[in-house]
Amino acid sequence: MKVRIDIDESLTEEEIIIRCPSINDNINDIQKRLLDITKSAPNIIFYKDNKEYYLDIADILFYEILDNSCYAHTNDEVFLAKYRLYELEEMLPLNFIRISKSTIVNTKHILSISSSFGTSTLIEFNKSHKQVYVSRRYIRTLKERLEERRKTIWKNGFGDYYL
């Protein structure tokens, strides 16, 4: 695969063109990643104790719905986020993935996944006591996304960039 950058000072915005003989999984993956990279970080305002907080979404472990409200969990805190999960799914980068009807997780913070026969699958997070359960409907997609992340980390020499 060739990569070429052409500088054109007459352009008013960047343009990325992918030339290929046919569409395949690799091209689709590149397109998906480019869209994710170019997507601006959402401006989500979080609330707690009558205060507004402006957190980096990278610090969010997961979002969950409790009593018809959406809450964002960090390692130690919980904040109200005035969004519905489907709205967050559209706004958040690819490292966030729905794992149940009421939860979206940040895959970058997942430490472990454990399941026992006949019970739910449990996710534990890095540097946190918090845990969430994955529903059977979403476990396959989650594992695929984690495998993509693992491959990308390996390919990039354990660098900081991954899904």
Image: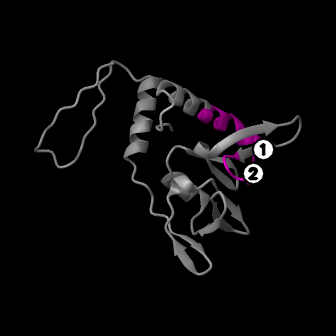
Residue 27 pos. (x, y %): 41, 26
Left or right, 9 with respect to 21, comes to left
Query: Which residues fall within the magenta stretch?
Result: 125-146
Identify which amino acid the numbered label 1 is placed on: Leu
Sort mark 1 into few (<14), some (14-19) or many (20+) by Cα contacts within 10 Å. some
Circle 1 residue: 122
Residue drawn at x 75%, y 51% is 131
Left or right, 43 with respect to 65, comes to left
Q: Which residue lies furthest to the front in this view?
A: 127
Residue 80 pos. (x, y %): 62, 69
The answer to whether the residue labelled 1 contacts the one labelled 2, judged by CB atoms less than 8 Å apart, is yes
User: Residue 55: which disc?
Assistant: none
Residue drawn at x 89%, y 37% is 118
Residue drawn at x 69%, y 62% is 65
Residue drawn at x 55%, y 78% is 51
Please, which colouring scheme is shown? Answer: one colour
Left or right, 31 with respect to 151, comes to left
Is residue 103 inside the magenta stretch?
A: no
The one of 160 and 9 positioned closer to us in this rendering: 160
Sort mark 2 into few (<14), some (14-19) or many (20+) by Cα contacts within 10 Å. some
Left or right, 122 with respect to 5, comes to right
The one of 104 and 153 positioned closer to us in this rendering: 153
The one of 37 and 108 positioned closer to us in this rendering: 108
Above or below, 67 relative to 134: below
Which one is earlier in the sequence, the residue at label 1 or at label 2? 1
Circle 2 residue: 131
Identify which amino acid the numbered label 2 is placed on: Gln
Residue 152 pos. (x, y %): 51, 29
Residue 14 pos. (x, y %): 24, 43
Q: Which residue lies furthest to the bottom in this view?
A: 50
Where, quadrant-wise, is the N terminus in this rendering?
top left
